Amino acid sequence: MIVKVRGVLLRFTNYENEIEVGGGTVREGLAELTERYPNLSEVLLDREGTVRATHLIALNGEQLTLDELDREATEDDRVDIVTAVSGG
């Protein structure tokens, strides 16, 4: 699968925005991604290894809940990580 990283998270992936990872599910793909980029893990995941609420995960454009991260993903699928930005 291809993981697309944008915005503030790019600095944690050496500014690579499309990263090919393995794994049979979205969760496994994210695990490989954070293994490859340990600094990303600290920002993307909380202490329990759960995706932080400030990040949205989408599979082929469909937003997933945390319970849906075990959905199957093939090498042709695209996973987007979008970080919610707040300000005033």
Image: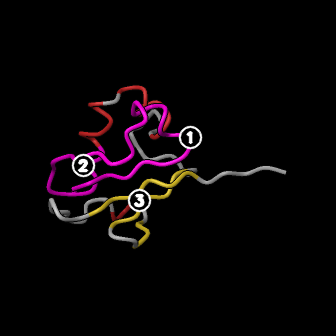
Mark closer to the chain start, 3 or 2: 2
Q: Position of residue 42 (x, y in %)?
A: 46, 30
Circle nearer the N terminus (3, 1)? 1
Answer few, some or many: residues within 10 Å of disc 3's Cα (few below 14, many 20 plus, some between 14 and 19): some
- Residue at which label 2 appears: 29
SS class of the residue under badge 2? Answer: helix
Q: How far apart are the alpha carbons under marks 3 and 1?
A: 21 Å
Residue annotated with mark 3: 66
**Image side of residue 79 versus residue 20, left or right:** right
Q: Is residue 70 magenta?
A: no
Residue closer to the observer: 48 or 19: 19
Residue at image position (37%, 39%) is 16
Spatial CA span between label 3 and label 2: 14 Å
Left or right, 23 with reference to 6: left
State the CA–CA distance, disc 1 to disc 2. Answer: 20 Å
Residue projecting furthest to the top = 39
* Residue at 40% over, 58% down: 80
The residue most toward the bottom is 62
* SS at mark 1 in the image: helix
Of the residues under marks 1 and 2, which one precedes in the sequence? 1
Disc 3 versus disc 1: nearer the observer: 1
Q: Which amino acid type is marked by label 1?
A: Val
Q: What residue sits right under mark 1 in the picture?
A: 8
- Relative to 41, say whether 74 is above or below: below
Q: Amino acid at mark 3?
A: Leu
